[in-house]
Amino acid sequence: AAPCSIRPYRASDRDPVISLFRFGILEHVYPAFFKAMCHKDHVGIALSISMAGYVLGGSSYCMALLFGGAWAALVYYCCHEIYDSYLSRKLDMEMADIQGSFLDNPVNNFWVAEAEIDGQIKVCGPMNDMNDGSAGEVFKLVVSFPLRRKGIGTQLTEKAVEFCKEQGLSRLVIETTSAQVAAIALFRKSSSKFVALGSFHTCSF
């Protein structure tokens, strides 16, 4: 595991935290697009549209590619809009006032991990936890790309588990999508024994 220190968020962390948060949301656009395009329904639609282009273009392979490409571009645009809209909402709500949304509430928290990147100590992984009274929920966990697969995500997750136990909660819940392959792998190998329940991974204490 890469050496890092995990501490509460400070106001001076805002810019790197927002940058990582933005990256952590938008990096899922391409995996979601790829998954959508591989779905049998979309494959069928793409082939049908390409065939229509081929016929309408007078047996033109170029028109077939153009029509198929236009469909793929539309699917990508829709995937990007979904994640971009989610990002905009979160930046205008919880992330607009991290101190007020998380740290001012004693049952919530927001941590950052600091590690050395290119010879400098930088924020490499923000993670926040929200408590609904019976269970904690990880709002977002992101690790800087150069420091992934070095155990930092695991350390942040264990910090959230520890915090929930201190709060007397019965479980920790983390929402994931099927496109978040790395996150799902992290929770499956965690010593806290997360269990997949639909789109959530849950750890009971």
Image: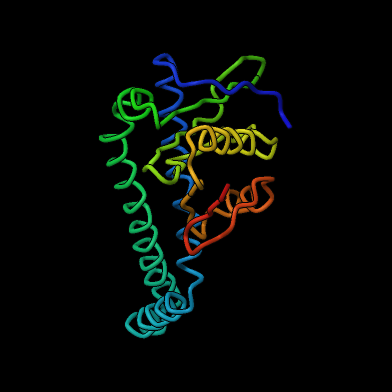
Q: Residue at x 69, y 50 (%)?
A: 189
Q: Would you place residue 177 above or below residue 109 in this image?
A: below
Instruction: Give the x, y percent position of residue 13.
Output: 44, 19
Residue toward you, 202 or 185? 202
Residue toward you, 110 or 176? 110
Instruction: Give the x, y percent position of residue 19.
Output: 43, 29
Q: Would you place residue 46 above or below residue 181 in this image?
A: below
What is the quadrant of the N terminus in the image?
Answer: top right
Residue toward you, 86 or 108? 108
Residue toward you, 85 or 57? 85
Q: Quadrant of residue 15?
A: top left
Q: How is the image coloured?
A: rainbow
In the image, 109: left or right of 116?
left
Instruction: Give the x, y percent position of residue 33.
Output: 45, 60
Instruction: Give the x, y percent position of residue 132.
Output: 36, 43
Q: Residue at x 61, y 37 (%)?
A: 158
